[in-house]
Amino acid sequence: SQQGEEDPQALSIQEGENATMNCSYKTSINNLQWYRQNSGRGLVHLILIRSNEREKHSGRLRVTLDTSKKSSSLLITASRAADTASYFCATDLSGYSTLTFGKGTMLLVSP
Amino acid sequence: GAVVSQHPSRVICKSGTSVKIECRSLDFQATTMFWYRQFPKQSLMLMATSNEGSKATYEQGVEKDKFLINHASLTLSTLTVTSAHPEDSSFYICSAIMTGDGGIETQYFGPGTRLLVL
C-alpha cells in the first residue's frame, strides 16, 4: 500500500490564494520530502523536514510535520500561476534511499 | 500496475571504470524517463531527462560527458557513469512517465541502483 498519500488529488485556486496540500504516511520515518513537478519535467526538490522537526519555511512555502498523526502539510502562500504543477511528498524510512512517493496533488492556479 | 525496473540493484566497482545502469519500463512505453541521484539522508536530485530518440537534457551542474544517457527504445534508458570515482558513489533512481487514457501522465519510479566506487 502507498506509504505517502497526498490529499487532495487535485486543487484549483485563484492567484493570491493560499494552497494547502496534505500528506499522510503509515510507518515511522527519518525524514519527509516535498517535491514539485511541472508537466513533462522531472521532480524538483522543495523542502526536506526531518522527523525531529515540526515546521520549516522556504520563501512562500511552509511545511509542517506531525509525527504523532503521521502527517505533513505543504502550504504555498500568495500563490501564482507559475505554481501550477504537481506536488509530491516522499517519505524516507531509513535515512538512505528508501524514498516512497505518494501519487501527488495536482495544483492549478488560475490568473 | 505499471512497473519500472533497474539493473543492477547494486554495483561495486574500482575507480576509473565505467558503470552502466539500465532503467526499463516493463509493461508500458515511456517516451520520457528521468534520472536522479540521492546521497544519504538527502533529497533526490534530478540529473537529466531522457527522451526516446533524442539527446538527453541535463540539469545545470551535471556533466553530460560524465553521465552518458541513452534512451534507445520506448522501454529502456541507460545511464553510464564514465570513469567513476569515489565521489560518484550514490543511489541512482530512474522514473518513467506513462501516458494513459485522456493524456493523463503517471510517473513510476524504479527501485534504484546503489553504486559504490572504491
Image (spheres, coloured by chain):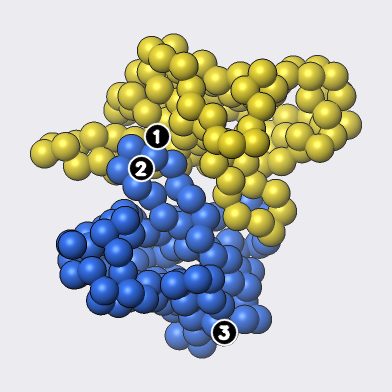
Chain colours: A blue, B yellow
Give the residue type that dot 1 points to. Ala
Image position, residue A78 (x, y; %)? 33, 74
Q: Residue B84 sits in which quadrant?
A: top right
Q: Which residue is mark 1?
A: B96
**Image point 60% across, 55% down: which residue?**
B43
Q: What chain does badge 1 belong to? A: B
Q: Amino acid at mark 3?
A: Arg
Q: Is residue A79 above or below residue B61?
A: below
Q: Give the CA distance from mark 2 to mark 3.
A: 29 Å
Quadrant of the rendering where the N terminus of chain B is positioned: top left
Question: Which residue is tagged 3?
Answer: A54
**In the foreground, A111 or B38:** A111
Q: Give the side of residue B38 with respect to residue A70, left or right.
A: right
Question: Which label sits in the foreground, 3 or 1?
Answer: 3
Q: Quadrant of the C terminus of chain B?
A: top right
Relative horizontal placement of residue A71, taking residue B42 as reference (left or right): left
Residue A8 at what x, y percent from top left? Answer: 25, 69
Chain letter, disc 2 residue: B
Which quadrant of the structure image shows residue A56? bottom right
Q: CA distance from mark 1 to mark 2?
A: 6 Å
Looking at the image, residue B59 sits to the left or right of residue A36; the answer is: right
Q: Nearer the viewer, residue A98 or A64?
A: A64
Name which residue lies at 38% across and 50% down: A37
One can see residue A88 in this view: yes
| Amino acid type, callout 2 | Gln
Residue contact at pointers 1 and 2, CB within 8 angstroms: yes
Instruction: Say which mark, if any, is on residue B107.
Output: 2
